[in-house]
Image: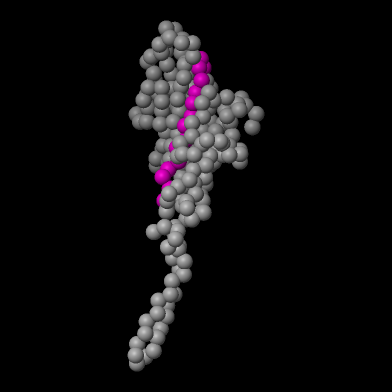
């Protein structure tokens, strides 16, 4: 069903003996439903050369352990709504070059099942990237995507994914994905990105 099929419908039945009867129905497409599906945290070591021995570790109590899911090289895919298991956990990606270590450390918190909050605590010897991914909407398509930062639309950001590169204080803020359908209805979902040491 597309938007042209929406509206009020009337059904009339006529009988030669009993006359006619009418019934009415209202048909409308479902309002889109939207969640933030995941984020990817990426470490970019600086200084050139070859970096190796990438480790993705997690912690719930200050002790680090090797990650069992979502980790591959310098990228770590986090799915925040996976049974709530990852809520409140710390994550760290490290890499080695000679005696030098590069790392990024972050904490994932969910204020609700449909929102995502990442606090990047520390970046050493390099930079970090973050990529937000919105889930496929439920409802009638096709879809139009718009991304906003602190309520200002981000030019050129028109897909399910939005990547934030070279994370510094200017990248901190509230990111919103807005999805609309061809019936001019829309849904939004927020992701919160914080950088420790930056002014709110």
- Residue bounds of the magenta highlight: 124-138
Image spot of residue 50 (x, y percent): 40, 11
Q: Main secondary structure of the magenta part?
A: strand
| Numbered-mark total | 0
Residue 196 in view in this figure: no
Image spot of residue 190 (x, y percent): 53, 42
Image spot of residue 145 (x, y percent): 49, 43
- Tell me the residue at 49%/11% (across/down): 47
Quarter the N terminus occupies: bottom left
Residue 128, above or below 117: above
Quarter the C terminus occupies: top right
- Tell me the residue at 37%/90% (across/down): 18
Q: To which quarter of the image does residue 193 belong?
A: top right
- Residue found at the very far right of the displayed protein: 199
Q: To which quarter of the image does residue 148 belong?
A: top right
Using the image as rendered, state which of residue 140 and residue 61 is in the foreground.
Answer: 140
18 falls in the magenta region:
no
- Residue 95 as seen in the image, left or right of residue 200: left
Image spot of residue 171 (x, y percent): 57, 29
Residue 183, above or below 200: below
Q: To which quarter of the image does residue 55 belong?
A: top left
């Amino acid at each position: 069903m597309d938007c042209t099929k929406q509206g009020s419908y009337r059904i009339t039945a006529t009988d030669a003996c009993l006359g006619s009867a009418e019934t009415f129905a209202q048909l409308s497409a479902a309002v889109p439903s939207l969640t933030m599906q995941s984020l990817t945290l990426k470490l970019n070591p600086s200084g050139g050369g070859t970096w190796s021995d990438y480790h993705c570790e997690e912690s719930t109590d200050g002790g680090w352990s090797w990650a069992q899911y979502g980790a591959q090289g310098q990228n770590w895919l986090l799915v925040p709504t996976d049974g709530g298991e990852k809520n409140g956990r710390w994550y760290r990606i490290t890499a080695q070059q000679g005696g030098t270590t590069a790392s990024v450390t972050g904490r994932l918190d969910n204020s609700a099942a449909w929102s995502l909050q990442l606090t990047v605590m520390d970046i050493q010897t390099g930079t970090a990237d973050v990529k937000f991914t919105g889930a496929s909407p439920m409802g009638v398509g096709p879809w139009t995507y718009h991304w906003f930062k602190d309520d200002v639309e981000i030019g050129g950001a028109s897909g399910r994914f939005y990547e934030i590169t070279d994370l510094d204080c200017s990248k901190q803020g509230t990111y919103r994905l807005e999805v609309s359908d061809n019936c001019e209805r829309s849904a939004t979902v927020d992701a919160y990105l914080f950088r420790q040491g930056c002014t709110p």
